[in-house]
Amino acid sequence: MRVVIADDQVRARRSLKALLSTALPGAEIREAADGAEAVRLAEELRPQLVVMDLRMPGLDGIAATREIKSRWPGIKILVLSLYPNLREQARTAGADLFVGKGEPPERLVCAVASLL
């Protein structure tokens, strides 16, 4: 199992990595600080899942989602964002699920399980 976490906030990435490491024992979890790095890691690793923030400097999560899904449609993308008003844009870009950052961690774990 390979997972990429894309978020420009180091603390958010580390927290997600800790949560997903517990939920997905043995998974290889890599971190990306922006959308461009997420696309690069998707090409390198061909992960089963990308957990994508939307608001990042440079290539944002919407553009990164669109690029990943156009090149590797089998990669699942779970958007994790503070901006519920961007839900439809994320879906249009190809996101498989949208979870708000304010939701309980159990919701994220259930969402991940539903995609894998």
Image (cartoon, rainbow, N blue to C red):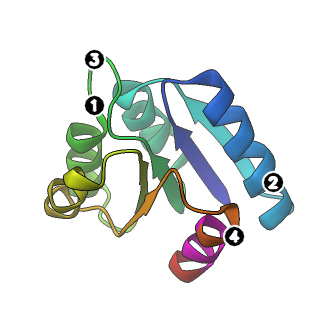
Labelled pair 2, 3 in contact (Cβ < 8 Å): no
Image depth: mark 2 or mark 4 in front:
4
**Secondary-structure class at tag 2:** helix
Numbered circles on residues, count: 4
Quadrant of the image containing the C terminus: bottom right
Q: Which residue has dot 2 on it?
A: 21
Look at the image and say whether residue 109 sits in the magenta stretch: yes
Q: Which residue has dot 3 on it?
A: 58
- The three-letter amino acid code for the residue at tag 3 is Gly
Nearer the observer, 105 or 77 = 105
Provide residue 114's location: percent of width, then percent of height: 55, 82
Give the Cα separation between the discs numbered 1 and 2.
Answer: 25 Å
Look at the image and say whether residue 41 sits in the magenta stretch: no
Quadrant of the image containing the N terminus: bottom right
Residue drawn at 63 percent across, 34 percent down: 13
Q: Residues within 10 Å of mark 4 (few under 14, many from 20)?
A: few
Q: Which residue has dot 4 on it?
A: 106
Chain part drawn in magenta = 108-113
